[in-house]
Image (cartoon, helix red, strand yellow):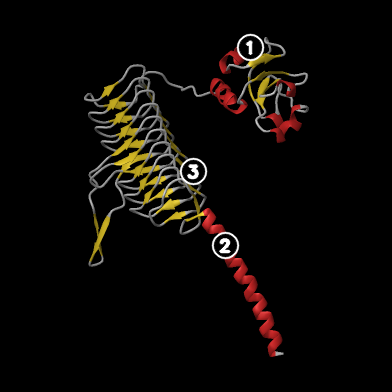
Amino acid sequence: MASLKELGQLIGGKVVGDPKLSISGVSALDSGKKGTISYLYNTKFKKFLDTTNASAVIVSDESLINNKSGLVVDDPRLAFVKILEFYSDDSDSFTGIHESALISKSSKIGSSTNIGPNVIIRDNVIIGDNVIIGPNNVIDSNVEIGNNSKLYSNVHLYSNSIIGNNCIVHSGVVIGADGYGFMTINDNHIKIPQLGKVVIGNDVEIGANSTIDRGTIGDTEIGEMCKFDNGVQIAHNVSVGKGCLMTAHVTIAGSVKIGEFCAFGGQAGAIDNVTIGDRAVFACYTAVTKDLPGGKMYSGAPAREIKEKNKRDALYFEFKRLKKRLDTIEEKIKN
């Protein structure tokens, strides 16, 4: 619970209307609820300002508020993110170290770190300060977890994995499992040992049920500020540059090198041993089958620059149209 004035101070906004107005939470503009605050970031939703039941609205133009209370800021969307953080209910049901947790005496636990029920922490693990380890996590030997990171329930960190500061790892994530490596000799599949590790930078978020495999000899590396959606698969020896975004079910095969600030739509992927330049963008379902330069947008399977793909598609449909006309002419000649 906070007053409109307090929220205004939080986001650096101008208060319009009743500064003492009590705000208990947030709601969407079109389905606003009394006692909550909403926001307008796109003028196409302006029509909901007159009908919303939200008690206050964040806008960029004071004239839009009319008879309501609200806050005026330069960027309503960014301001609303701060409001969401303020009202987020991310409290944990445990503090300190739960009595059921099994922690090796050789491991080091930082200050103000919370460890939930049924957690297993093996030998020589180093966990930083203000870390939250959710229930049923398994943390194998020689793992390092940086300060202010959070692991939700049922995460498994295999041995030697390194997690940076301020990271969020959602439920069901497996980091550091063996990469998929086999040699087939005389119809026998011989497993290739995986001796590397996974190194994850600072400020990384990994979505639920994602998997990041250890390297075969070298390491699998995830750069700082990367954000992965649910179900992302990163194979062995992959290097992902700083600030990359991967949405649901993106699959990156072994030894791929991805530059900085690349973005992958849902179910996009790359075959092994390709290199992708900085700031490349891939539409949903795109399949990268060769080295691609950065700074361009790609789609299709195999991946092609969207401008090129549109030209080819236009030519394809033009050829189909011409073929149909030729077929019609041939039929007339025959008759």
Residue type at mark 3: give it.
Thr
CA–CA distance in space, label 1 to label 2: 55 Å
Residue type at mark 2: give it.
Asp
Q: Residues within 10 Å of mark 2 (few under 14, many from 20)?
A: few
Q: Say which residue label 3 marks.
A: 247
Q: Quadrant of residue 126?
A: top left
Give residue 5's mark: 1
Residue at 35 percent across and 33 percent down: it is: 201
Vertical placement of 68 versus 235: above or below? above
Give the position of the N terminus as an image quadrant: top right
CA–CA distance in space, label 3 to label 1: 37 Å
Of mark 3 and mark 1, the one earlier in the sequence is 1
- 49 with respect to 297 (left or right): right
Element type at mark 1: helix
Element type at mark 3: loop
Element type at mark 2: helix
Q: Viewer-proximal residue, 231 or 141?
A: 231
Residue at 61 percent across and 66 percent down: it is: 317
Image spot of residue 120 (x, y percent): 31, 31
